[in-house]
């Protein structure tokens, strides 16, 4: 596929929005107000709890570690790529997903957060066919506290999509995607591909 520059994978910005003051997990945990249900719900939504933290390799500075990516379609087994396997990212580009035309599907990811709270994780994607951009997508995945023994991994299912249909839509597509947060830190960027076919591969 034609190359995709960083300018094609830029998260949208809300005018006037500024990233708030950073706090550690311990500081967030101390924000306790028995009478403020909204604050307590917000902390719960981040995953902040009293459960013991998972051990973290001090040499691993990554805040977000993407473990797997999968294609989910009703009535069919998930097609899952385990990113811990050597060469997995490279295989995403060289071994395309096969999607039946008109089929409804969704992507999903499993990931781990470590060291500190991850704010505003987003998934950006650009799809091209024969060098022409056919879609650009952005999905807000949310903010997350570091994983704990109670919650050792996060799973996020993306919005459902529908494959194009018809003879003109069939063929090979290339895509570039990345996971980025409110601080514009890119946690993973990768190329992948898929084929729109008349029917599922057996």
Image (tube, rainbow, N blue to C red):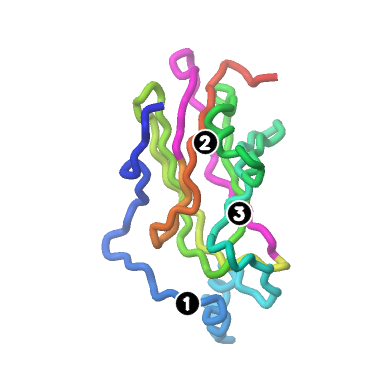
**Circle 1: element type:** loop
Query: Which quadrant of the figure contains the C terminus?
Result: top right
Label 3 belongs to which residue? 111
Q: CA distance from mark 1 to mark 3?
A: 21 Å
Frontmost of labels 1 and 2 is 1
Pinpoint residue 141: horizontal percent, then vertical percent.
51, 54
Q: Magenta stretch containing residue 21, yes or no? A: no
Pinpoint residue 180: horizontal percent, then vertical percent.
44, 53
**Circle 3: element type:** strand
Q: CA distance from mark 1 to mark 2?
A: 36 Å
Q: Residue at x 63, y 41 (%)?
A: 86
Q: Earlier in the sequence, mark 1 or mark 2?
A: 1
Label 2 belongs to which residue? 161
**Any mark on residue 71, and which?**
none
Label 1 belongs to which residue? 23
Please identify the residue farthest to the top as the structure is shown: 167
Q: Earlier in the sequence, mark 2 or mark 3?
A: 3
Frontmost of labels 2 and 3 is 3
Q: Is residue 44 visible?
A: yes
Q: Residue at x 48, y 16 (%)?
A: 166
Horizontal arrangement in the rendering, residue 96 relative to residue 23 (left or right):
right
Horizontal arrangement in the rendering, residue 26 relative to residue 1 (left or right):
right
Query: Over which residues does the magenta segment extend?
Result: 151-176
Q: Earlier in the sequence, mark 1 or mark 3?
A: 1
Horizontal arrangement in the rendering, residue 180 relative to residue 159 (left or right):
left
Q: Magenta stretch containing residue 174, yes or no? A: yes
Q: Residue at x 68, y 36 (%)?
A: 78
Instruction: Find out whether the residues at labels 1 and 3 contact each other: C-beta distance under 8 Å.
Output: no
| Vertical comparison of 191 with 27: above or below | above
**Circle 2: element type:** strand
Instruction: Find out whether the residues at labels 2 and 3 contact each other: C-beta distance under 8 Å.
Output: no
Mark 3 packing: few (<14 Cα in 10 Å), some, or many (20+)? some
């Amino acid at each position: 596929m034609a190359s995709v520059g960083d300018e094609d994978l830029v998260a949208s910005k809300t005018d006037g929005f500024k990233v708030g003051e950073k706090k550690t997990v311990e500081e967030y945990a101390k924000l306790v107000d028995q009478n403020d249900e909204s604050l307590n719900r917000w902390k719960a939504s981040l995953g902040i709890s009293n459960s013991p933290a998972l051990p973290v390799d001090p040499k691993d500075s990554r805040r977000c570690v993407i473990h797997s990516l999968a294609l989910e379609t009703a009535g069919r087994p998930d097609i899952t790529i385990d990113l811990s396997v050597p060469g997995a990212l490279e295989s995403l580009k060289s071994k395309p997903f096969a999607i039946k035309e008109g089929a409804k599907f969704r992507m999903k990811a499993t990931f781990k957060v470590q060291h500190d709270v991850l704010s505003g994780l987003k998934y950006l994607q650009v799809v091209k066919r024969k060098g022409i951009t056919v879609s650009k997508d952005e999905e807000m995945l949310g903010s997350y506290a570091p994983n704990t023994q109670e919650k050792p991994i996060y799973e996020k299912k993306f919005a459902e999509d529908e494959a194009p249909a018809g003879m003109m839509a069939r063929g090979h597509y290339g895509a570039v995607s990345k996971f980025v947060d409110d601080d514009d830190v890119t946690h993973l960027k990768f190329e992948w591909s898929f084929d729109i076919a008349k029917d599922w591969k057996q």
